[in-house]
């Protein structure tokens, strides 16, 4: 039983050295293998409460489906927020839609989607609105994948 406690303490120490938040953009391109990125996220992200934001254009340059399927196979879950181009009037980014890797019929999924919308409105959208217009084009629809471990370790 002492060994279990020692391993538990070591796991806690290891998790404390991992990132609570990872933000990435322009990380995947058509034809590239998403597995190295997913393995990096797995190695660096705190499995207890870590959250990763990956920004990419709608369609993910042809790699999005493979990326999302690979996330699920590697033990992650994700929420996707589809965001509009900047509003030409005020330059603001707005939400078009949200989706989840979880089943939409469960109450846990509903709570998760509510949390995603809260994250999107309090963190993601304000952050994106700070990006200079020449970096984030006015006419491009883009999305943010919010990634967490499916099972807390």
Image: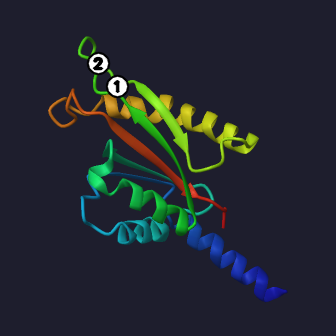
Name the image quarter holding the C terminus: bottom right
Numbered disc total:
2
User: Where is residue 119 shown, x and y percent of the image?
Assistant: 53, 36
Q: Nearer the viewer, residue 46 or 81?
A: 81
Q: Residue furthest right?
A: 1
Q: Which residue corresponds to the image point at 53% horizontal and 40% vertical from the top-left?
A: 99
Q: Which residue corresponds to the image point at 28% horizontal and 57% vertical from the top-left?
A: 27
Q: In the rendered structure, find residue 70 and report the number of the disc placed on it.
A: none
Residue 55 in the figure: left or right of residue 20: left
Mark 1 residue element: loop
Task: Say which residue label 2 marks.
Answer: 87
User: Where is residue 147 shown, x and y percent of the image?
Assistant: 50, 53
For disc 2, the neighbor class at 10 Å (few under 14, some 14 to 19, many from 20) is: few
Q: Are marks 2 and 1 in contact (CB under 8 Å)?
A: yes
Mark 2 residue element: loop
User: Where is residue 136 shown, x and y percent of the image?
Assistant: 22, 35
Q: Is residue 70 visible?
A: yes
Q: CA distance from mark 2 to mark 1?
A: 6 Å
For disc 1, the neighbor class at 10 Å (few under 14, some 14 to 19, many from 20) is: many
User: Which color mode does the image show?
Assistant: rainbow
Residue 99 position (above or below residue 90): below
Task: Say which residue label 1 marks.
Answer: 93
Residue 124: quadrant of the picture: top left
User: Where is residue 80 shown, x and y percent of the image?
Assistant: 47, 43
Residue 91 position (above or below residue 14): above
Q: Which residue corresponds to the image point at 56% horizontal and 38% vertical from the top-left?
A: 116
């Amino acid at each position: 039983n002492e060994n279990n406690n020692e391993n538990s303490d070591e796991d806690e120490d290891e998790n404390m050295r991992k990132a609570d938040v990872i933000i990435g953009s322009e990380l995947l391109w058509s034809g590239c293998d998403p597995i190295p990125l997913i393995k990096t996220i797995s190695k660096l992200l705190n499995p207890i409460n870590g959250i990763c934001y990956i920004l990419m254009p709608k369609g993910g340059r042809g790699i999005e489906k493979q990326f999302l399927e690979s996330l699920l196979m590697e033990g992650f879950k994700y929420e996707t927020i589809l965001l509009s181009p900047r509003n030409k009037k005020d330059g603001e980014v707005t939400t078009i839609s949200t989706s989840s890797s979880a089943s939409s019929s469960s109450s846990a999924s509903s709570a998760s989607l509510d949390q995603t919308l809260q994250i999107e409105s309090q963190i993601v959208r304000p952050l994106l609105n700070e990006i200079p217009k020449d970096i984030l084009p006015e006419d491009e629809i883009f999305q943010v994948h919010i990634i967490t471990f499916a099972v807390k370790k």
